[in-house]
Image: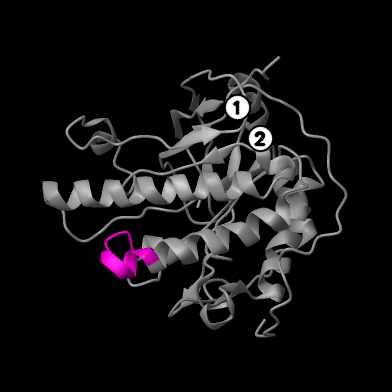
């Protein structure tokens, strides 16, 4: 039965060891998953903090946790963030060259495990963690090019699905505190009406691939809250009916309940406080009888 995913505005925050062990492997026990509605999860998410310039940092798409700042993320840091009153941590990640194109798009095990470790620092405090694909698509010189055409875009879609399959599998047994954000600020370089419409169609395809891929990994991912994106962060274009942006279809055996929620989360960095807007997919609330 179809699930409708409603549009929301979300104010989000911003190893050289090469090993390609399968991201399918996970030994963590399945966590009980609470079925929170939009109001409940919004309330629990509370204030949010962006772990920026850390796992998203890269040179030529080779990510490095301490490339743009000198500090490795520690449990003590996340504890301090939690104790300061934050309930949500956004964990933006550039995957870049940590993806082995010649090996079925396998993600470097050390990099994926490090991301998992830092997510765990927050999960231990019952914080929500938002994990994404970050500069791979935000900078169109990366592999996640929404402006690609033909066979090149088919390759983008194949790689995109493979990367999300591994991330989702790694976290599929986590409870509702893990949320996936499919991409970040994706846009082509053609600002004409035709270029914007092309970007929207490609983004819609990728949003659908993201939802389908995550759901197919099973476990708690069958009902996990997911976030999808429009073109860049331009809400005016999202609401412009001439561009025809549509949300992905989500089939998961739940009754369709559309909803719209505004989630207000402050983004704090060491240097500044900023506000950003995103679109998110919201999952339906009531199980089928």
Horizontal and vertical percent for residue 189? 21, 61
User: For mark 1, what is the residue?
Assistant: 42
Q: Secondary structure at mark 2?
A: loop
Q: Which residue appears at 64% of the width and 61% of the height?
A: 166
Q: Which mark is residue 223?
A: 2
Give left or right: position of 36 versus 12.
right
Q: Where is residue 123 drawn, in percent x and y?
A: 77, 46
- How many residues crowd around disc 2 within 10 Å: few (fewer than 14), some, or many (20 or more)? many
Q: Is residue 217 magenta?
A: no
Whole-Å distance between the Cαs marked 2 and 1?
16 Å
Decide which of 82, 35 is in the foreground and name it.
35
The residue under the point 16% across, 58% down is: 190
Q: Are marks 2 and 1 in contact (CB under 8 Å)?
A: no
User: From where the camera sits, is residue 254 visible?
Assistant: yes
- Residue 65 seen in render: no
Q: Indicate left or right for 268 with 233 as reference.
A: right
Instruction: Find numbered disc 1 in the image and state the secondary structure of the residue it sits on.
Output: helix
As drawn, which residue projects farthest toward the top? 289
Is residue 156 shown above or below 47?
below
Mark 1 or mark 2, which is nearer the start of the sequence? 1
Look at 25% across and 59% down and name the residue there.
Answer: 188
On-image quarter of the N terminus: top right
């Amino acid at each position: 039965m179809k699930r409708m995913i409603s549009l929301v505005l979300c104010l989000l925050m911003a190893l050289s060891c090469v090993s390609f062990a399968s991201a399918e492997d996970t030994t963590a026990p399945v966590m009980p998953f609470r079925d929170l509605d939009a109001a409940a999860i919004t309330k629990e998410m509370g204030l949010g903090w962006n772990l920026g310039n850390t796992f998203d940092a890269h040179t030529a798409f080779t990510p490095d946790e301490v490339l743009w700042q000198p500090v490795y993320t520690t449990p003590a840091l996340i504890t301090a963030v939690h104790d300061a009153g934050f309930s949500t941590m956004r964990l933006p990640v550039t995957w870049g060259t940590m993806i082995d194109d010649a090996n079925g798009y396998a993600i470097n095990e050390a990099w994926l495990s490090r991301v998992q470790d830092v997510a765990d620092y927050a999960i231990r405090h019952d914080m929500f963690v938002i994990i994404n694909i970050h500069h791979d698509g935000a900078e169109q010189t990366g592999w996640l090019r929404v402006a690609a055409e033909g066979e090149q875009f088919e390759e983008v879609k194949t790689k995109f699905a493979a990367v999300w399959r591994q991330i989702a599998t790694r976290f599929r047994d986590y409870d509702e505190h893990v949320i996936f954000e499919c991409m970040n600020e994706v846009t082509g370089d053609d600002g004409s009406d035709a270029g914007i419409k092309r970007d929207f169609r490609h983004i819609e395809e990728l949003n659908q691939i993201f939802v389908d891929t995550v759901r197919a990994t099973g476990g708690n991912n069958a009902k996990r809250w997911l976030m999808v994106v429009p073109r860049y962060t331009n809400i005016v274009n999202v609401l412009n009916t001439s561009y025809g942006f549509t949300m992905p279809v989500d089939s998961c055996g739940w009754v369709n309940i559309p909803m719209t929620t505004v989630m207000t989360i402050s983004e704090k960095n060491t240097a500044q406080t900023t506000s950003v807007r995103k679109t998110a997919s919201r999952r339906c609330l009531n199980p089928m009888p």
